[in-house]
Image (tube, helix red, strand yellow):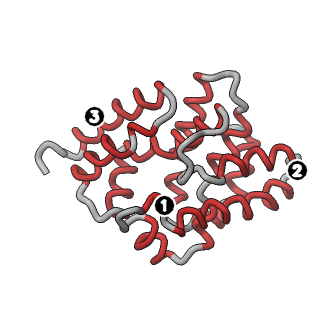
């Protein structure tokens, strides 16, 4: 991890002690950097800051509400807590990045990605596409399936089926789809999803 990126990660550590974001964020960061490598025109520092900070807003929300309202309702993608975690992420990220010496323009660009990363259908920039996809790609790993299936109260095989119908169609980049399909095949095999 780049030194500047690790400084942001360390500064945000307090906000990651909820919803297992201290696992989700580093894995998503890895995907974001892989995707950014495929798109050299993308601003890697914007991508890094946005992926590291995109979910810190969950810190401000009651943990029972996170799971009951943010993952276990029929229309969970558009629940109030999902919008709230995005706006809280923007609110918390601005002073954090200011303290680290980032410009107002940089902070605004990162905030634009954080705001709506779960609830907005369209991406506003290449960096936004990379962050949105990296945020989803971690779910295709063994770790991601193991954690996220509990959020939705599903067995791993059921959650894997849901990834195919509810996540892959919303990935923006062809590289992301290829990564998702390859990782999902490995995860299904590892977790014996064809059996249990």
Q: Residue at x 74, y 41 (%)?
A: 3
**x, y percentage for residue 18?**
53, 68
Position of residue 8 measured from the top left corner of the image (x, y, whole percent): 73, 51
Which quadrant is home to the N terminus?
top right
Disc 1 or 3, which lies upstream in sequence? 1
Above or below — where is 153 with respect to 113? below
Of residue 52 and residue 136, the one placed in the foreground of this image is 136
Asked if marks 3 and 2 touch (Cβ < 8 Å), the reply is no
Image spot of residue 196 (x, y percent): 13, 51
Q: Compared with residue 67, is residue 177 higher up or lower down, i.e. above or below?
A: above
Image quadrant assignment for residue 140: top left
Outermost left residue: 195
Disc on res. 24: none
Q: Nearer the viewer, mark 1 or mark 2?
A: 1
Which label lies toward us, 1 or 3? 1
Q: In the rendered image of this protein, does residue 67 appear above or below residue 187?
A: below
Viewer-nearest residue: 38 or 118? 118
Alpha carbon distance from label 3 to label 2 = 42 Å
In this figure, which residue is indicated by the disc labeled 1? 78
**Residue drawn at (11%, 46%) of the image:** 195
How many neighbours does mark 2 have within 10 angstroms: few (below 14), some (14-19), or many (20 or more)?
few
Secondary element type, mark 3: helix
Q: Residue at x 22, y 49 (%)?
A: 157
Residue to which mark 2 is pinned: 101
Q: Nearer the viewer, residue 45 or 11?
A: 45
Which numbered circle lies on residue 185? Answer: 3
Q: Is residue 163 left or right of residue 133?
A: left
Q: CA distance from mark 1 to mark 3?
A: 29 Å
As drawn, 25 above or below 133: below
């Amino acid at each position: 991890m780049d030194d500047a990126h690790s400084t942001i990660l360390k500064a945000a550590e307090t906000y990651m002690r909820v919803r297992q974001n201290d696992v989700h964020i580093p894995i998503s960061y890895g995907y974001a950097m892989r995707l950014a490598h495929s798109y050299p025109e993308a601003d890697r520092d914007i991508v890094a800051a946005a992926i590291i900070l995109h979910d810190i807003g969950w810190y401000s929300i009651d943990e029972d509400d996170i799971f009951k309202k943010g993952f276990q309702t029929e229309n969970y993608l558009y629940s109030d807590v999902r919008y709230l975690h995005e706006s809280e992420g923007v609110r918390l990220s601005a002073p954090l990045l200011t303290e680290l010496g980032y410009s107002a323009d940089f902070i605004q660009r990162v905030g634009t990605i954080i705001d709506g990363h779960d609830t907005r259908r369209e991406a506003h920039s290449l960096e936004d596409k990379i962050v949105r996809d990296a945020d989803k790609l971690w779910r295709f790993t063994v770790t991601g399936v193991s954690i996220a299936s509990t959020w939705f109260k599903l067995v791993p095989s059921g959650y894997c089926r849901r990834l195919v119908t509810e996540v892959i169609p919303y990935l923006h980049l062809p590289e992301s789809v290829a990564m998702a399909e390859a990782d999902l095949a490995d995860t299904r095999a590892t977790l014996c999803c064809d059996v249990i």
